[in-house]
């Protein structure tokens, strides 16, 4: 539990997940004022379990950082929503950018490996691919138990 407290973003203690992500993007925007950062949030519970909230926040943070740092993106779009999946409900996170896109032979660094491990630990999946219109596209889907999702909100 102490480890979770160290990796859990403090914003999640005071804000709903959507507002915590808005705050994250506002902070990034302060450091990169010439970049456009957009959040499109569909239906979401205010909170899921601590591990799910932290994973979604950290994956967003890492994907946005990668888009700016490695892709030199000018615009980054974050889409997040609870969706119906083949095996129940899931939270789907999609981060797209207009940068250089992933290299032909991607080298998975600690950031991507960490995101993959976090998402898999929650029974989800994630991938990085070339975006449909160029740039990169990071997609993560994390299952949501019935007791946590919008159906119980």
Image (cartoon, helix red, strand yellow):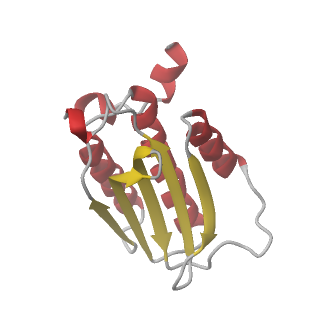
Q: Taking 126 as reference, is 148 above or below it?
A: above
Residue at the location (51% across, 75% down)? 73
Residue 28 placement, left or right of 111: left
Foreground residue, 139 or 27? Answer: 139
Whether residue 22 is visible: yes
Whether residue 15 is visible: no
Foreground residue, 39 or 24? Answer: 39
Looking at the figure, which quarter contains the C terminus? Answer: top left
Residue 146 placement, left or right of 52: left
Report which quarter residue 75 is drawn in: bottom left
Q: Position of residue 26 (x, y in %)?
A: 30, 56
Q: Position of residue 34 (x, y in %)?
A: 38, 75
Q: Taking 65 as reference, is 115 above or below it?
A: above
Residue at the location (48% across, 70% down)? 96
Residue at the location (78% across, 60% down)? 107
Furthest toward the left, the residue is: 153
Report which quarter residue 10 is drawn in: top left
């Amino acid at each position: 539990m102490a480890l979770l407290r160290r990796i859990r973003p403090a914003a999640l203690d005071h804000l709903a997940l959507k507002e915590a992500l808005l705050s994250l993007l506002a902070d990034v925007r302060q450091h990169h004022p010439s970049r456009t950062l957009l959040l499109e949030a569909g239906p979401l519970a205010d909170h899921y379990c601590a591990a799910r909230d932290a994973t979604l926040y950290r994956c967003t943070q890492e994907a946005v950082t990668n888009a700016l740092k490695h892709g030199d993106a000018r615009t980054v779009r974050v889409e997040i929503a609870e969706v119906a999946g083949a095996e129940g409900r899931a939270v789907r996170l999609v981060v797209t950018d207009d940068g250089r896109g992933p290299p032909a032979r991607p080298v998975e660094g600690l950031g991507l490996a960490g995101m993959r491990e976090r998402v898999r630990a929650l029974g989800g999946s994630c991938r990085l691919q070339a975006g449909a219109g160029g740039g990169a596209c990071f997609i993560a889907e994390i299952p949501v138990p019935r007791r946590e999702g919008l159906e119980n909100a």
